[in-house]
Image: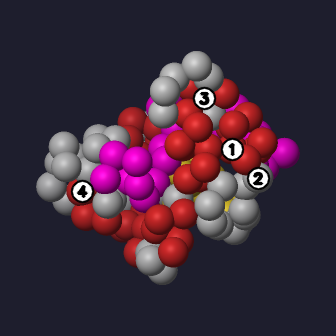
Amino acid sequence: MSRTLLIVKPDATARNLIGHVINRLEKARFALVDLRLVRLSKDQARRFYAVHEGKPFLDGLVAFMSSGPVVPIVLEKDNAVEDLRALVGATDPAKAACGTVRNEIGLNIEKNSVHASDSDENAAKEIAFFFS
C-alpha cells in the first residue's frame, strides 16, 4: 500500500463538491486515512507550492489557494499516486479525459478543483505539510 494526497480546492469547496469528490475516491477504492477542512494563509500556500517559485503563475495560485477553505485528504491504495493522477485527469479540465474528476467538475486550468501529488516523494512531503 502507498499513500498520496489530494486537496479539494477552493472552487470545489465553494460549490459544495467535497462529498462528490470523496464519493469518487471511495468508488475508486481509495482508503481515506485522514482529512481536514483548513484555510491556508498566503504564506502557507506559498510554502506548499514552493516548487513553483519563480514561475509566472505562482502569485495567482497562492491567491486562489488562500481564497477559501480546502480539504486535504490522505489516501491509501496500491499505486496510490499513479491511480489518483489517472482519476483526477490532466491539469487543464478542457484536456482531461472524459470521466476524470477535473473533466467533470474543473472550471478551467486555474480553478481545476483538485490537487493530486505527482510522485511518492512529493506525496510524503505534502502529507507532512498538512498532517504532522
Left or right: 39, with 81 as reference point? right
Q: Is residue 68 visible?
A: yes
Q: Residue at x 62, y 34 (%)?
A: 49
Residue located beneath label 3 in the image: 122
Q: On screen, 58 above or below 100?
A: above
Q: Residue at x 53, y 43 (%)?
A: 60
Label 1: state its secondary structure. Answer: helix
Between the C-alphas of marks 3 and 1, the distance is 15 Å
Left or right: 86, with 57 as reference point? left
Label 3: state its secondary structure. Answer: helix
Estimate how packed mark 2 is, as few (under 14), some (14 to 19) or many (20 or more) residues with alpha carbons within 10 Å: some
- Of circles 4 and 1, the one toward us is 1
Estimate how packed mark 3 is, as few (under 14), some (14 to 19) or many (20 or more) residues with alpha carbons within 10 Å: some
Q: Which residues are magenta?
A: 108-132
- Where residue 53 appears, as percent x and y from the top left, is 62, 23
Between the C-alphas of marks 4 and 1, the distance is 24 Å
Q: On screen, 14 above or below 86?
A: below
- Where residue 5 appears, as percent x and y from the top left, is 58, 46
Choose between 100 and 10: the one closer to the eye. Answer: 10
The mark that comes first in sequence, 2 or 3, is 2
Amino acid type of disc 3? Answer: Asn
Residue 127 is marked as: none
Location of the N terminus by quadrant is: top right
Residue 41 is marked as: 2
Residue sitting farthest toward the left? 98
Amino acid type of disc 2? Answer: Ser
Residue located beneath label 4 in the image: 103
